[in-house]
Image (cartoon, rainbow, N blue to C red):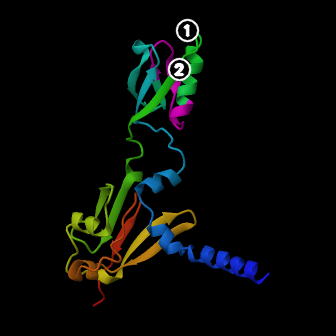
Amino acid sequence: MFRYFMLFLVFIVSGCSSTNSPEENTLIDNSSSFYENREIYRIGVDDTLQINVWRNEELSVSVPVRPDGMVSVPLIGDVRAGGMTPMEVAEAIEKKLRNYIHEPQVTVILAELRSHEFVSRVRITGAVQSPASLPYQQGMTVLDAVLEAGGINEFAAPDRAKLFRKGKTGTQKYDVYLGDILNSGELETNYSLIPGDIITVPERMF
């Protein structure tokens, strides 16, 4: 009986030791997990779709989504794309093509994502040389964003900088010791960024 009790305690302890704090879990996040956790992409105006109809090259086209949310497809005319997923658009095209083709097979690929450009940006504001909205790039860190903004200005209070990140439970705020990063090479708070992050650098109090 004592042997089984000890095994039970080992199981509990090992389970507890694998649990991270919410802060750790959030900041381990990267660009791939960001996109996986978001809702399925909905097509918007100015996106470009590559529509492929199997064994019918003449019907396969690359088309932009018009302001009315429609795309023009050979043979069948206009099909709604705005607000839909690529799979839903493919199914709608297949349904219309059945009037002309036996068992059509359609794939829709997002060739250019223009309508959601600002979703995939990182922003840095406050006491920097050039506050900026930057296109996110894989591997981007807090330091990268600060350097892209021209560095801090003479009024900055770098060790009171903050990183704001939207999560499932709301916006989280993290301390960024920017002075330590810039002057001492201490990188503990040089967090990896994800699309949508906002960095603020306040001015020092006189």
Outermost residue toward the bottom? Answer: 206
Q: What amino acid type is highlighted by mark number 2?
A: Gln
Q: Is residue 154 left or right of residue 175?
A: left
Residue 64: percent from left, percent from top: 39, 30
Numbered badge on residue 105: 2
Q: Nearer the viewer, residue 124 or 91?
A: 91
| Residue labelled with disc 1 | 100
Circle 1: element type:
loop
Residue in the picture at 60% in, 19% down: 95
Question: Is 162 part of what is drawn in magenta?
Answer: no
Q: Nearer the viewer, residue 11 or 160?
A: 11
Residue 51: percent from left, percent from top: 44, 25
Work out whether 114 lies above or below 143: above
Q: In front of the other: label 2 or label 1?
A: 2
Task: Give whichever of discs 2 and 1 has the lower sequence position.
Answer: 1
User: Magenta region: which residues?
Assistant: 72-88
Question: Is 74 part of what is drawn in magenta?
Answer: yes
Label 2 neighbour load within 10 Å: few <14, some 14-19, many 20+:
some
Circle 2: element type:
loop
